[in-house]
Image (tube, rainbow, N blue to C red):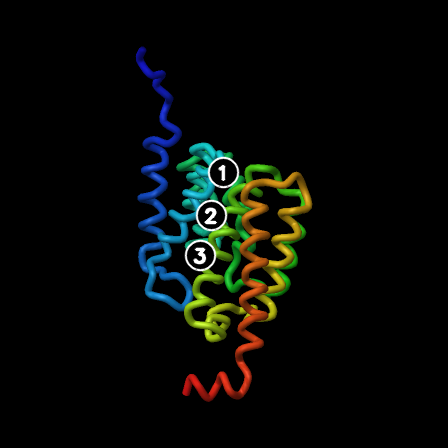
Amino acid sequence: MRSRRVAPKIGHRFEQALLFACRKHADQMKKGTDVPYISHLLGVAGLVLEAGGDEDLAIAALLHDVVEDCGGAPMLKEVRRRFGKRVAHVVAGCTDSDTYPKPPWRARKEKYLKHLRTADADVRLVSGADKVHNAQAILTDYREIGEPIWERFQGKRQGTLWYYQELAKEFRRRKPTRLGRELGRVVSELETALAQGKRSSGPRAGRRHK
């Protein structure tokens, strides 16, 4: 008996988007590292596909930072022209600023949290994948290098933790999703790691690491 062939979920448009993202983010690295930024975009696209996203959403995942980091509002027009209205809609929904210089960090994050409350399922899926991948990276790097990690972020330790705690609450607020549950789990692990780090950072622990 011959197995049923399934149409591929991604195709030439995804390849075009990957090349576009590679070129636009070519000289960018992940904060505080020498890791090419494309690694984050590929990770987010992978999470989107694993959560059931289609080609449009996988493309939006690859391009979710291109407006914010590579050209602002004119870049969104290019995304719409190249990849269509749905992709552009999701990319816009994952963008917390399209102007330069960017507004103050706290105001941007509060505005984005408010935006998520009414965002549609497509935007929330790609945004959730982005936040999960970021939170996983923060947790992994914190376990490796400790407190110096917070110097990478405008919100520093307190602001960054606040933001991800609020994101976890927001993604739990509606019908639970795979990515929402994963974000909550990672944020909980980060909170535990921070509490353990605080307990072990007394004077004696400090002397041992001189």
Which disc is residue 191 wearing? none
Q: Which quadrant is the C terminus positioned in? A: bottom left
Q: Does any portion of residue 201 appear in the rendered image?
A: yes
Q: Which residue is mark 2?
A: 64
Name the quarter where the N terminus is drawn: top left
Q: Quadrant of residue 49?
A: top left
Query: Does the residue at mark 3 contact the one at mark 2 (Cβ under 8 Å)?
Result: no
Q: How many angstroms separate mark 1 from mark 3 (CA)? A: 25 Å
Helix or strand or loop: what does disc 1 sit on? loop
Residue occupying the point 67% across, 52% down: 114
- Vertical side of 121 occupied by 43: above or below: below
Q: Secondary structure at mark 3?
A: helix
Q: Amino acid at mark 2?
A: His
Give the answer, above or below, for where 93 lies relative to 29: above
Q: Identify which amino acid the numbered label 1 is placed on.
A: Ala
Q: Residue furthest top?
A: 1
Residue sitting nearer the eye, 102 or 120: 120
Which residue position is annotated with label 3? 69
According to the image, label 1 marks what residue?
A: 51
Q: Tell me what residue is drawn at x 36 percent, y 61 percent.
A: 29
Sequence-wise first label, 3 or 2: 2
* Position of residue 61 measured from the top left corner of the image (x, y, whole percent): 45, 44
Question: What's the CA distance linking mark 2 and mark 1?
Answer: 17 Å
Question: Residue at horizontal 59%, vertical 52%?
Answer: 184
